[in-house]
Image (cartoon, grey):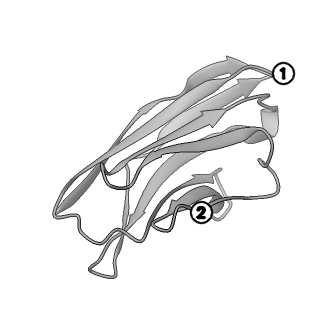
Amino acid sequence: QVRLIQSGGGLVQADGSVTLSCSGSGRIFATESMGWYRQVPGKQREFVGKRTNSGVTEYSDSVKGRFIVSGSLALNYLVLHMNNLKPEDTAVYYCSLSNGDFRTYWGQGTEVTVSS
């Protein structure tokens, strides 16, 4: 069993910042990557950013230059620093972990609301 527990988020004004964190536990091994996705009602979940086991960090074009992914895959811990937030960043954010059992696990989701 793998669990991902998220914390952070909430209500923030435009141009502000917020930080999300994700901590994994359980039968985690050979982690390929950990990442962040987001979803708004009526739309598909979209990729935000991730860190791979080779140390590469990738971002979607919509957040590049504003969001920073940090943390340690060895510790099953990931952080998303969200800066210069825009109202269109409002979504439920999910942490993900691609495990050595070839399954992807998800956190419980955290709401981020950006007011204009």
- The percent coordinates of residue 82 (x first, y second) are 66, 33
Dot 1: few (<14), some (14–19), or many (≥20) neighbours within 10 Å? Answer: few
The quarter of the image holding the C terminus is top right
State the SS at label 1: loop
Discs 2, 1 touching: Cβ within 8 Å: no
Q: Amino acid at mark 2?
A: Val
Residue at the (74%, 58%) spot, across then down: 60
State the SS at label 2: loop
Q: Amino acid at mark 1?
A: Ser
Residue at the (16%, 64%) spot, across then down: 27
In terms of depth relative to the viewer, which is nearer, 55 or 5?
Answer: 55
Q: Nearer the viewer, mark 2 or mark 1?
A: 2
Horizontally, residue 87 falls left or right of residue 100, namely: right
- The percent coordinates of residue 26 (x first, y second) are 16, 57
| Mark 2 or mark 1, earlier in chain | 2
Disc sitting over residue 56 in the figure = 2
In terms of depth relative to the viewer, which is nearer, 58 or 61?
Answer: 58
- The percent coordinates of residue 113 (x first, y second) are 65, 29
Residue at the (50%, 68%) spot, across then down: 54
Q: Which residue is mark 1?
A: 116
In terms of depth relative to the viewer, which is nearer, 97 or 71?
Answer: 71
Residue at the (65%, 50%) spot, across then down: 40
The quarter of the image holding the N terminus is bottom left
Q: How far is disc 2 from disc 1 in space, using C-alphas? A: 33 Å
Disc sitting over residue 26 in the figure = none
